[in-house]
Amino acid sequence: MLNTSFFPTSVPPRPMGHYAHIILLRETDSYALFQTDGELNTARVQAGLADKNRTLITRITMFKRKQTTPERLSGRELLRRYGLVSPLQADTSDKKADARGVQVDANGLPICDYNVDFCKQCPDCISYGFAIGDSGSEKAKVFSDTGYSLTPYDSSHEAFTLNAPYESGTMSRQGETTSRINEQDHVRPQTLFPAVVTIRDATSALFLYVLTNILRTRRYGAQTTRTGTVTNHILGIVLADGELFSNLHFTQSLYDVLAEADQIRPGQPVVVETALQAAHTLAANLIATEPIAVSQYLDGSELTTFLDNIGQRTRTEAGMRELLQAAQRDSTTYHGQYIQKTKGKK
């Protein structure tokens, strides 16, 4: 269903204007923590765009790295699971690199140590980029931006008192009460974060790699072993020659639509199905006003069929391995042509 001829056959060394956008709503399915320095991240912004009074509200923010990092880690987990990168940590004291300048293990697999020593050639490195000081860098092909909660902070957060009891189940032992009691703000379940993820100048295999990471990632924010589950609802895929609207513009526009329909109510979550339907119609209207040439807008039943096909493919180990190997081939080719070659010239 997706027009794969739109994508470049190989990753180009310079921007070529192949933009693939994934429009989605991120829905918290449990109490999540999107925080810095112990507090939820927030921003004071205009509620909607149609309000002539320009009413300001506080929104919970989901910083870009709070979105891309869990998705990157999901993809890297799969690359290790299917034997495309090594599970070993990098040896920063005595690097053992192959002829391409890549550190490898005893089986010849590249060692890609996240935020320590990137291999510079796997789908994660080429898609999401890397920076290794004086050793080089690669600009990300995946563009992301801060996400904003659809509903105000007052309706989207809840404070909890947390404790750490002893094994007996009480907060005291031998007559002394522990001080391990804390209060923490959490993002409420069914809080929505409208978002657009843009992938520029990636091959179709690398685009599917990024899309699969979004579909498979379930936990975001802090304390992901205990909470932070999120569902990513895909609304549409847009292939165009330029970028689409921002996350904030999308959020404020959707707020206007739902507020006019009396669906924004203090202290209550927005009905997810209502928001999805409104966002679907809104996205089409916003795309029509963008000053870009759209090659394809995949939505509705065609999008459902496409995502079902992707799901059938990734539900089998053979299908997932095939998808990852295709992305690995495109990444290795780009590394050999533009990263390894540049290093060799030095």
Image: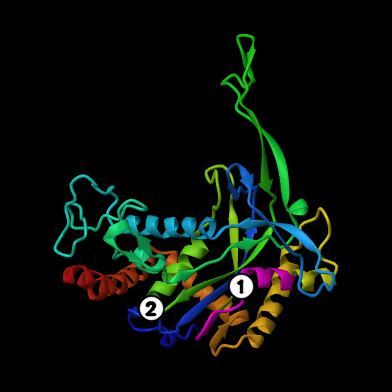
From the viewer's side, name the closer residue of 135 and 243. 135
Figure disc tally: 2
Please provide percent x and percent y for residue 232.
Answer: 58, 63
Give, as a three-letter code, the residue at label 2.
Answer: Thr
Q: Which is more toward the observer, 333 or 346? A: 346
At horizontal 21% and vertical 44% (from top left) the residue drawn is: 93
Please tell me which residue is depicted at 41% across the width and 68% down the height of the picture.
140
Identify residue for label 2: 203
Q: Which residue is mark 1?
A: 246
What color scheme is it?
rainbow
User: What percent of the width, then of the height, locates residue 61?
Assistant: 64, 57
Pointer 1 local density, CA inside 10 Å: few below 14, some 14–19, many at least 20: some
Q: Which SS class for mark 2?
A: loop
Which quarter of the figure has residue 302? bottom right
Q: Nearer the viewer, residue 147 or 219?
A: 147
Q: Earlier in the sequence, mark 1 or mark 2?
A: 2
> Measured along the vertical axis of the image, is residue 153 above or below residue 307?
above
Query: Which residue type does callout 1 highlight?
Result: Ser
Indicate yes or no whether the magenta region holds residue 240: yes
- Report the mark closest to the observer, 1 or 2: 1
Q: Name the residue furthest left.
A: 99
Q: Position of residue 306 (x, y in %)?
A: 52, 77
Residue 122 seen in render:
yes
Helix, strand or loop for disc 1: loop
Q: Quadrant of residue 103?
A: bottom left
Residue 72 in magenta? no
Instruction: Please state the extent of the stretch shown in magenta in the rendering.
Output: 238-254
**Mark 2 Cα shell of 10 Å, populated few (<14), some (14-19), many (≥20):** many
